């Protein structure tokens, strides 16, 4: 199996985290990479806040501060960190989340990887939450890198859906190739539903066995979101399927995967499709 990754890279303090974690997952899934750097535009309303003269429309932060070489330096770092993996590079100007999502829609990618930018204050106002937007709207599975770690313990959350089964497949494949421990968990919202959660876990364990790895079972009762977020503290990587709820559904029901992305302290793999395993 050969897979294709889109890696969204930024000259942020968390770039090292992104490269350390993504290298492990990319190699485990026998991937090749397109590393994409997006130079964000500076909205005119921020010129006075940045204490710089108004420039032409579409001028980039890099150009304004005389660091047009930033993409080249970032790519040098990426290629060094991903040595042994085929890496292509691409740089564009625009809104980072929008450009990454456009590339996902137009390209033939199996997976995307983004990191938390670590941006604060005016940086965050300009950049926004790139990882959150990509996680919410991507049509392919997205790995959100939040911390630098060796991936030794993997948690897959299942509700018995097809996307959850796909998450188990990806988790099993990664765990096998990284020699990592795999746990399959299902959360019952109430005690009366625990039997269903047990069946979901049994099915997940059987899928993992088909990929040549034994998985531990974990059944919990309680709030799905809160339980996953709390349990994620014990793992290096968490995988879960996501249905991609509409805005109204998110308002009425909440969105488990997005809540996990926002609040989990570890790396999160959101699975919305399973092209590499179909």
Image (cartoon, rainbow, N blue to C red):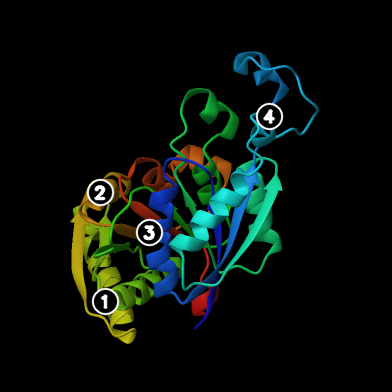
Task: Say if residue 138 shows up in the picture.
Answer: yes
The mark nearer the N terminus, 3 or 2, is: 3
Left or right: 185 with respect to 85? left
The residue located at (32%, 45%) in the rendering is 264
**Distance from label 3 to label 2 (Cα)?**
24 Å
For residue 30, above or below residue 271: below
Label count reads 4
The residue located at (71%, 62%) in the rendering is 106
The mark nearer the N terminus, 3 or 1, is: 3
Residue that badge 3 annotates: 21
Q: Quadrant of residue 5?
A: bottom right
Q: Position of residue 249 (x, y in %)?
A: 52, 44
The mark nearer the N terminus, 4 or 2, is: 4
The residue located at (61%, 18%) in the rendering is 50
Crowding at mark 2 (Cα within 10 Å: few <14, some 14-19, many 20+): some
**Camera-nearest label, 3 or 1:** 3
Does dot 3 land on a helix, a strand or a loop? Answer: helix
Residue that badge 2 annotates: 227
Residues tagged 3 and 2 counted as in contact (Cβ below 8 A): no
Does dot 1 land on a helix, a strand or a loop? Answer: helix
The mark nearer the N terminus, 4 or 1, is: 4
Q: Position of residue 97 (x, y in %)?
A: 60, 45
Res 205 label = 1
The mark nearer the N terminus, 2 or 1, is: 1
């Amino acid at each position: 199996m050969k897979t294709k990754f889109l890696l969204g890279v930024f000259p942020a303090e968390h770039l090292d985290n992104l490269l350390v974690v993504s290298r492990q997952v990319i190699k485990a899934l026998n991937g090749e990479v397109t590393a994409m750097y997006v130079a964000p535009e500076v909205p005119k309303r921020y010129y006075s806040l940045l204490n710089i003269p108004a420039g032409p429309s579409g001028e980039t932060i890099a150009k304004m501060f005389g660091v047009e070489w930033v993409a080249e330096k970032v790519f040098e770092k990426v290629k060094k960190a991903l040595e042994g993996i085929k890496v292509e590079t691409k740089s564009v100007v625009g809104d980072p989340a929008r450009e990454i999502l456009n590339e996902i829609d137009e390209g033939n990618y199996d997976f995307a990887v983004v990191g938390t930018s670590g941006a604060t204050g005016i940086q965050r106002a300009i950049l926004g939450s790139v990882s959150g937007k990509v996680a919410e709207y991507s049509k392919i599975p997205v790995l959100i890198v939040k911390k630098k770690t060796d991936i030794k313990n993997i948690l897959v959350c299942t509700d018995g859906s097809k996307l959850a089964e796909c998450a188990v497949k990806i988790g099993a494949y990664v765990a096998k190739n990284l020699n990592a421990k795999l746990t399959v968990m299902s959360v019952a919202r109430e005690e009366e539903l625990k039997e269903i959660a047990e069946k979901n876990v049994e099915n997940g364990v059987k899928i993992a066995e088909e990929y040549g790895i034994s998985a531990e079972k974990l059944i919990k009762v309680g709030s799905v979101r809160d339980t996953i977020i709390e349990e994620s503290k014990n793992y290096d990587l968490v995988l879960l399927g996501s249905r991609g709820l509409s805005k109204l559904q998110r308002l009425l029901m909440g969105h488990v995967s997005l809540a996990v992305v926002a609040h989990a302290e570890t790396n999160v793999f959101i699975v919305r499709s399973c092209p590499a395993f179909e």
